[in-house]
Amino acid sequence: MLPDSSNAFIGGVFYGAAETLVGHPFDTIKVRMQTSEKRFKGPLDAAMVTYKNEKLNGFYKGCTPSMLSWIIMDSITLGSLHQYRYFLKQNFYNDYKTLPLFGHCIAGAMSGWTVSIISAPLEQIKSRLQIQYDSHSKKFTGPIDCATTIYKLKGLKGLYSGLPSTLLFRSASAAWWGSYESFKNYFNNNTNLSTISINFWAGGLSSIVFWSVGYPADVIRQIIMTDNIQNPVFKNNILNVVKYVYKNRGIMGFFKGFGPSILRSFPANAAGITAFEFVMKYL
């Protein structure tokens, strides 16, 4: 029995809030690693330099649009995910007792593409604010100033400059929600863990699968989204970024910042999915 999709939208709000509070500092380090060439020696150095120069506030730069965006995005992701699951079950797997794994993967990918329409401009604003290291690199006073500046210079097209790469990245949602169901089924059938513990571990582990699959695309989109607004070097072209990263960083360049991303993904998404499933019990 699939949960009511309207409840899933509400539950997604709690997912997004929990995910942001736990994960934003790690996300800041990830973005700074992805978009800088020689500023940091590694993730630990990036964290130490950030704290030394900007204190705790540095880790939460861009948190306001991040909180807003994650609440909106996770609400849309989980609401649409359940809608797509229901649609697939009713129209393609009606003879099945439950939706099969492939159906969960397809629903996951479709929810990822759906949320990309909202996430592309919001995540661009977040990323641009996160790489404002000091007064010398500060171009925007806040999320509203960032959004209006981009719109004045490039219009709506500028705000959506990262959409193609975001669609590519969000395709990894197929692996995310497919693996989430697999982990849940495994823990339910092979352990005596409580429901909350199963949700926690399945949520955390599936997020690692998601980031492992989608990380190279995330590197590409972060570079595109933080490109020069007036004179973009990469022309919003995914292939241009792929060539640049491979030429200047090698194959491992597509995994730059992967460490803090994984450190963030498990606790942030485990907390998020636990909050979601807990709220869904009472809706």
Image: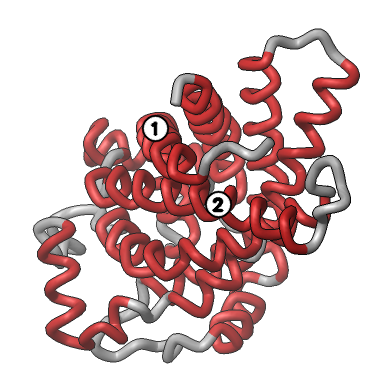
Name the secondary structure under disc 1: helix
Q: Is residue 272 left or right of residue 206?
A: left
Quadrant location, the N terminus: top right
Q: Is residue 189 left or right of residue 180?
A: right
Q: Position of residue 189 (x, y in %)?
A: 88, 21
Circle 1 crowding by C-alpha within 10 Å: few under 14, some 14–19, many from 20: many
Q: Position of residue 32 (x, y in %)?
A: 41, 55
Amino acid type, callout 1:
Phe
Query: Disc 1 to disc 2, how far (Cα)?
Result: 27 Å
Q: Nearer the viewer, mark 1 or mark 2?
A: 1
Q: Is residue 167 left or right of residue 193?
A: left
How many numbered markers are drawn? 2
Observer-nearest of 110 and 95: 95
Name the secondary structure under disc 2: loop
Asked whether the viewer can see residue 253, the reply is: no
Q: Is residue 202 left or right of residue 227?
A: right
Which mark is drawn over residue 14?
Answer: 1
